[in-house]
Image (cartoon, rainbow, N blue to C red):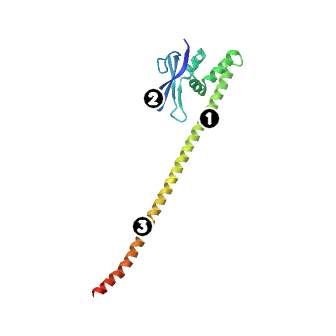
Amino acid sequence: MATRIRLQRHGRKGRPIFTIVVADSRVKRDGKYIERLGQYNPNTNPATIELDFDRALDWVVKGAQPSDTAAAILRYQGVMMKKHLLDGVRKGAFDEAEAEKRFDAWMEEKANKINAKKEGLSKAEEEARAKALEAERAVNEARKAAEAEAAAGETEASAEEATEEAPAEEASEEKES
């Protein structure tokens, strides 16, 4: 039986969430599976991946072939790196302690990259909020200035009307007498 590590699609239209499973290669995409390894949510930034690392490594070592997308996820999580290092240990290139040391260094570097991306995204989001707030303040100040000018214009217009009406009233009073 040829086993594959692949994704099953769930979620609503336009907002997929994928389950990472081990299944017989002959079974339909969303059909029966052997074991559930985790979940992949591409809707978040960065994408959220929950993976049972040890079980995924066990299946890869046993010979389960990952699909292209599943292989990318496994590489991102370090399963393929760990398999590579274990193959080196099996061949005698280095011992398990060295393999574990290399894997820990790789995972630490990977975690730093992920944290840098998250910090960059949050910083960009804060800057966008600050710009939007500043633009809103400018619009509010412009609106208040326009209202003040309109109010000042109305008082000047009413003062001019009062001065124009006063001589007209005097002239009409003189004609009546």
Q: x, y percentage for residue 95?
A: 69, 19
Q: Secondary structure at mark 1?
A: helix
Q: Could you tell me which residue is drawn at 41 percent across and 72 percent down? A: 157
In space, the residues marked 3 and 2 are separated at their CA atoms by 56 Å
* Picture disc at residue 126: none
Rendered image: mark on residue 11: 2
Residue carrying label 3: 151
Between 27 and 111, the residue placed more toward the observer is 27
Mark 3 or mark 2, earlier in chain? 2
Name the amino acid type tagged 2: Gly
The outermost residue toward the front is 175
Q: Residue furthest top?
A: 1
User: Few, some or many C-alpha atoms within 10 Å of disc 1 (few <14, some 14-19, many ≥20)?
Assistant: few
Distance between mark 1 and mark 2 Cα atoms: 29 Å
- The reply, left or right, for residue 170 in relation to residue 20 is left
> Which marked residue is nearer to the observer: mark 3 or mark 1?
3
* x, y percent for residue 150: 43, 66
The residue positioned farthest toward the right in the image shown? 93
Give the residue pinned by disc 1.
Answer: 113
Mark before the other along the chain sequence, 3 or 1: 1
Name above or below for residue 124 compared with residue 137.
above
Lower sequence index among marks 1 and 2? 2
Q: Quadrant of residue 68?
A: top right
